[in-house]
Image (cartoon, coloured by chain):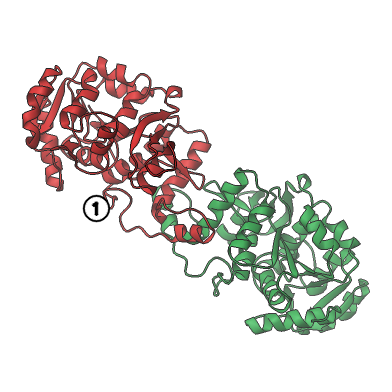
Chain colours: A green, B red
Amino acid sequence: MIVALAGGVGGSKLVLGLARVLPPGDLTVIVNTGDDEDFYGLRVCPDLDTVLYTLGSLVDPEQGWGLAEERFDTLEMLQRYGAATWFRLGNKDLATHLLRSLWLREGLRLTEVTGRFAAALGVATRILPMADAPVATRLMIAADDGAGERELAFQEYFVQRRWRDRVVAVRFAGIEQTAISREALEAIAAAKAIIFCPSNPVVSIEPILSVPGMRQAIRSARCPRVALSPIIGGEAVSGPAARLMADLGREPTAVGVARLYADVLSHFILDTRDAAQRPAVEKLGLQAGVLNTLMSSQEEKETLARALLRRIGVER
Amino acid sequence: MIVALAGGVGGSKLVLGLARVLPPGDLTVIVNTGDDEDFYGLRVCPDLDTVLYTLGSLVDPEQGWGLAEERFDTLEMLQRYGAATWFRLGNKDLATHLLRSLWLREGLRLTEVTGRFAAALGVATRILPMADAPVATRLMIAADDGAGERELAFQEYFVQRRWRDRVVAVRFAGIEQTAISREALEAIAAAKAIIFCPSNPVVSIEPILSVPGMRQAIRSARCPRVALSPIIGGEAVSGPAARLMADLGREPTAVGVARLYADVLSHFILDTRDAAQRPAVEKLGLQAGVLNTLMSSQEEKETLARALLRRIGVER
């Protein structure tokens, strides 16, 4: 059994590669839920859904998130009623949020709800939310635009304002009230390897590690624990990873990412473009590996997954 | 100010005619909510929405209910997740149910929610639900299919089973916990006429009259109170009106309808095809009028509205 930690778009690429090269059901993904937010009273879990839709072969191949061939009839009608519609929920996507909200209100845990979706879509990979109770990543932004320092909800920062703000602090509201789930604890305890996908370190991986019990469980696992960097050559492959690291005073490089998790890792994979950072990674007490970690095609996702598993001693 | 009582498709035809011939804002419609039901955790109010969409010029002109040019992407995805989808909710229609459910959970009354929709769609007619608290029309059906006598929710009877069952009793669950709203009470007190639209007497008009305080308020109004029959020539213009009347031991004719409301009416309009029932209606103590009450075209709706208002002494 392999466990992967993942956020949305970047992480789900490697998750898909792993799911394709591992025997069905041998992969468990623990997914960030700090991005979750309510829209029109519906619980939206962007990272969980990106992983679900990717593994269910339903994802929009251009965007890497959302469903393929979406239309926006509901959203247009909501707009007609005067509702805010900057968060673009598609017609089909809404079905997921509707059922999730219904089932949560009926008392199911988010873990169980996610399991129902995966079963319905024929996804053999176990998809686990990092926590059942809600967590809200919130970003304190600088006063650059004259509006004063203030806190944004994640989707406000990420989607509505397209991560244009300078971030001075990040917190995960509600995280102290969560706990690692029985399912995540069992998956980690049984893991032959734990893989930190190349997701945003600040707002995808860090919230997962901040769930009470999670860091301890991973540190205690007697298996290779390896991370990949979403920052290659000093730039994020996509999204605000490098920008956020720099804003928060962390080095926006692969080794900067390695430093964030060094306490719970045994291995770290550098991209070939960052091979020169190997000594710095080894100084953190980690075994360093160098691989081509850019995944453009489906083939590259599987190639990386295979190489990664081989590198940490898991034979495929 | 004119007050109309209405259910869905049949009633909204006359409501539209009245709205077109009266000055903007001079019409208040009190609408049946016994058909309301939750689907996927959303509050669906079919009759309110039929009146809203009709007056907002958004209704599907073929069906007489639902929105024009609907598609069913969300429903198809819900089906993929294994949800029951016999109640066909369109993409755009879902926006109404989403916002209504959200606003109700936020504490707004159904009357206020409905007012928001009307304002957003530019509808000048005041649309009032018969009650703010939920009411559920339930039908006890006979054991004809061998399954035993049992009770159905309204949409189960009407949409899922296409009113094929023999009905032995009807009740309006929750009606004792409702009360006539301040808005309905004021509209009735200020009315120059109260018009019972040609809606289903058993499951559209009767629930409205059963709201505590409603019958008394209408009886006390010092203005003409007139009803039209949805049964013409012994047959319902559409839907199960005649069938239900017969099932429940009532005469499935216009005069049978008149008998149901005679205690609160001053006038009753017979269709030209039913002119022979005039003496029977007059025996109930009502002033009888005869008009062509079939409304196929938009013009016929307005013609009937004008003739009706003239017949009860409201000059237009």
Please rate how many residues cluster around mark 1, counting C-alpha atoms within 10 Å: few if below 14, some from 14 to 19, many from 20. few
Question: Mark 1 — on which chain does it sit?
Answer: B
**Residue occupying the point 15% across, 47% down:** B296
Question: As shown in the figure, which amino acid type bears the numbered disc 1?
Answer: Pro
The answer to whether residue A210 is left or right of residue B62 is right
Residue B268 percent across, percent down from the top left = 15, 26
Residue B298 shows in the view: yes
**Residue occupying the point 12% across, 23% down:** B281
**Residue occupying the point 84% across, 83% down:** A276
Residue B122 shows in the view: no
Does A299 appear above or below B70? Answer: below
Residue B153 percent across, percent down from the top left = 43, 39
Does B29 appear above or below A306? Answer: above
Q: Quadrant of the N terminus of chain A?
A: bottom right
The answer to whether residue B47 is left or right of residue A167 is left
Q: Considering depth in this image, is A223 or B165 the residue closer to the camera?
A: B165
Q: Residue A295 is drawn in which quadrant?
A: bottom right
**Residue located beneath label 1 in the image:** B61
Q: Considering depth in this image, is A277 or A300 the residue closer to the camera?
A: A300
Residue B144 percent across, percent down from the top left = 37, 41
Residue A132 percent across, percent down from the top left = 71, 50
Q: Considering depth in this image, is B246 or A117 the residue closer to the camera?
A: B246
**Residue occupying the point 33% across, 39% down:** B166
